[in-house]
Image (spheres, grey):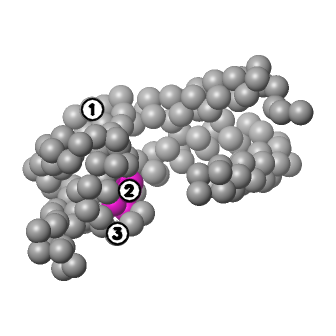
Amino acid sequence: MGPDPAGLERFFEHLQAVNRYVRAGWFGEPRRQPTRVQWMILRKLQRTGGCSVGELAQRVDVGPSAMSQMLDRLERVGWLSREPDPRDARGRTVRLTRQGEDVVRAVEQEWIRRLARPFARLEPDEQKQLLALMDKLAQFVTEEGR
């Protein structure tokens, strides 16, 4: 027997509510911080240490020319750089700059700060149980994605 569809819908709604809560404090100030798509790009670069324009385009499901325009904006504000790909003379590797790394760190710190108060309202055992279940779910999602 599969999971209860109503329960899955509730779970999804709760995930969205937590996501909106965390993002509201940070992405609510668009002049200071990256948009959601820019965040996806910056986070991918932070996790990989750098990648091609094509890989980034795939990540956010846009064409290479649209991605190049997005990267132009991020390069203009100093959050990333493009350099020749040592493995492909025609390719470029996109990397975070120090300023881009600082932006990623600041966003993550703000998210943790915003989550700390509501998370602290859970009992210590509830916190451990929630983390254990989320670890397990994340593992299953990763396995499904392969």
Taking 105 as reference, is 91 left or right? left
Q: Secondary structure at mark 1?
A: loop
What's the CA distance linking mark 3 and mark 1? 25 Å
What's the CA distance linking mark 2 and mark 3? 8 Å
Q: Can you tell which mark lies on residue 49?
A: 3
Q: Which residue is mark 2?
A: 44
Residue 4 location (% of width, % of height) = 82, 26
Q: Which residue is mark 1?
A: 30
Q: For residue 33, which quarter of the picture?
A: top left
Q: Can you tell which mark lies on residue 50?
A: none
- Along the viewing direction, whichever of 67 and 116 lies nearer the viewer: 67
* Label 2 CA crowd tier, 10 Å (few <14, some 14–19, many 20+): some
Q: Could you tell me if the residues under marks 3 and 1 are in contact, i.e. CB atoms within 8 Å?
A: no
* Label 3 CA crowd tier, 10 Å (few <14, some 14–19, many 20+): few
Q: Which part of the image, by quadrant, shows the N terminus? A: top right
Q: Is residue 4 visible?
A: yes
Q: Label the magenta part by its dominant secondary structure.
A: helix
Q: What's the amino acid at mark 3? A: Gly
Taking 38 as reference, is 76 left or right? left
Residue 130 location (% of width, % of height) = 77, 45
Name which residue lies at 66% across and 35% down.
Answer: 118
**Of marks 3 and 1, the one in the foreground:** 3
Name which residue lies at 30% across and 67% down.
Answer: 50
* Label 1 CA crowd tier, 10 Å (few <14, some 14–19, many 20+): few
Q: What's the amino acid at mark 1? A: Pro
Q: For residue 62, which quarter of the picture?
A: top left
The reply to whether the magenta stretch includes residue 45 is yes
* Bounds of the magenta segment: 42-46
